[in-house]
Image (cartoon, coloured by chain):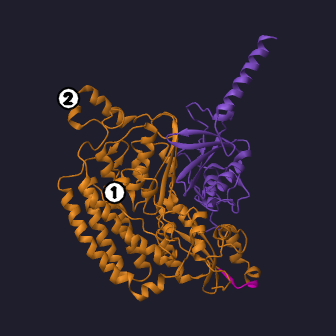
Chain colours: A purple, B orange
Amino acid sequence: MSDETAAAEEAEAEAVAEEATVALRYGAAVSESHGDVVLHATVETYLDVCGEAHADGFDQLIDLTAVDYLTYAGERTLPGGLTPERFEVVTSLINHVRRERIRIRTQVSADEPTIPSLFDLWPGSEYLEREAFDMFGITFADHPDMSRVLMPEDWVGHPLRKDYAVGAIPVQFKAASNER
Amino acid sequence: MTITDETPETIDGAARVRRRGDDAAVLRLSEAEAAAIGTDATTSDDDERVLLNMGPSHPSTHGVLRLMLEMEGETVIRSKPVVGYLHTGMEKQAEQLTFLQGCTNVTRMDYASPFFTELAFSLATEKLLDIEVPERAVWIRMLMSELNRISSHLLFMATNGMDLGAVSMMIYGWREREEVLRFFEKVTGLRMNHNYIRPGGVAADLPDGWKGEIEALLELLPPRLEEYDVLMTGQPIWRERLQGVGTLNTDEALALSATGPILRSTGYAWDLRRDQPYLAYDEVDFDVIVGTYGDCYDRYAIRLNEIRESMRIVEQILDKMPSGDYRVQDKKVTPPPRIRIDQSMEALIHHFKIFTEGFKVPEGEAYACVESPRGELGIYMVSDGSSTPYRMHVRGPSFINVQTMPHLMRDSLIADAVAIISSVDPIMGEVDR
């Protein structure tokens, strides 16, 4: 056995061991952040995780937003062997009976920023998803009205993306409909 | 109003708000589509429905809220709130400002209750810094929050009265609110946009004689609230105008992510101050006010009684206010006392550092939330270890509560739409941010 394969095997075993130590909830890896429970999902598992949380009594979607990690200076390690992507959709849920909150952080790639909409689980996500679309250009599949909410409808660009410059953009006005 | 066999108990509220098509309460129509309907005579002839624009500068739309209403005669069928007229990119701005400057930014969001956004911002920053503020700072924060809840609800009383034709109420509400703002001015230097609650504590200690001022305020308000009862609560015209108007049930409110008085008006007792206590709310005694019918009247009555509950809390704070420091003495977070700057070179350096490059906050992400007069106000903050937030997101309760409007308005008269907008009590600075 060559050293290379041995090293690869060792790395694999380590990964498996790590996998085993990571706690799972609703099929997603769990971590803890300043006293809050955080679940880590991918675009593929997102809807299943949310569906299970909904079935488990998380009766209200309290917040949904996105983060663009393009210029993040710190180190990004995610539990459960997930690969960090440029965008992250952050969904906060609340269970009123158990007085419990969870936060689901979902990795969304820059190449294909599309993620399922939660409208059918929690219709209150409508505006929050529209805001995330408006500000980050993340599309929520099967959303009833995927349009801008805060910026004008004909605006070009997504202001909260990190590559959207500050202050250097001329104000866009709607073209006058007729010549004076 | 369409008559159906459905009674409030048999309706699955969550399923109803989930509807997407023509039977939904929400009108999902773009500007271009709406404009096309306006000019195309062939489409508007086939049905009785008319598209009506309301706002953005209508006196009862509370700032710059605009509504697209689909009308059948005088009845509102579907509607679409159009927001964003006040959007100034505050979340983007926050990424340019240090954690210390951040409060000056967020305080301008919900301008009727600025202390709450400052508080949520400070709590989120303190979570990331992992510091605990001194007890006196906690109680000062609580005192200011509760007084702010009073002033915010008084403002609601004023605007709600004005919207419904009780014009004298507008003057009364503003008058009483001014008394509270006068105290704020004494403490913070400003009537609004205080930048008083900051990461690490508060900006300054309470001034001499603050207890007397508050005692005078607590003496002034109760008889005035009783006047409101005479003017509005028990008055038949007021009741006729609000009772049964704009109803929502608990399922719908939960499904629509509504919080605050809107959720409580459906009979659901959820108040973060009691259910997930922050600051020292577990050490004071107060009741969570709930409604029964989820109508405009309940939302009015909840806010009126929340003023009374807040006064109860303020009274207890008067007795329990601890002595001590009003901010954490961590040189890396709060500036040194003025006197130290003259005596110590290090103090001068710390002072200079804090006000030029700001303090650095460890990497991480945190969410902090408080019960604002409009519902859950949360701030989600991501830090990459620098002195400015990498990302700051505000969960503005007004923004999310605006979603309930089409559902409240469905099948009601256009005159009631004004009452409904008013009872949701949106602050557009927070909706648009």
> x%, y% of residue A78?
63, 34
Left or right side of A14 for A62: left
- Determine the residue located farthest toward the front in the rendered image: A98
Q: Is residue B21 above or below residue A40?
A: below
Amino acid type at image mark 2: Gln
Q: Which span is picked out in magenta? A: B45-50
Left or right side of B268 for A70: right
The secondary structure type at the circle numbered 1 is loop
Q: Residue at x 43, y 37 (%)?
A: B129
Task: Report which residue position mark 2 lands on.
Answer: B343
Q: Residue at x 54, y 51 (%)?
A: A100
Task: Report which residue position mark 1 lands on.
Answer: B284
> x%, y% of residue B208?
17, 53
Q: Nearer the viewer, mark 1 or mark 2?
A: 1
Which circle's residue, 1 or 2, is located before the other in the chain? 1
> x%, y% of residue B330?
33, 34
Q: Is residue B14 above or below residue B324?
A: below
Left or right side of A3 for B173: left
Amino acid type at image mark 1: Val
Q: Is residue B37 visible?
A: yes
Q: Is residue A21 above or below residue B96?
A: above
- Name the image quarter holding the N terminus of chain B: bottom right
Q: Categorize mark 2 by other alpha carbons within 10 Å: few (<14), some (14-19), many (20+).
A: few
Chain of residue at mark 2: B
Residue B145: quarter of image = bottom left
Chain of residue at mark 1: B
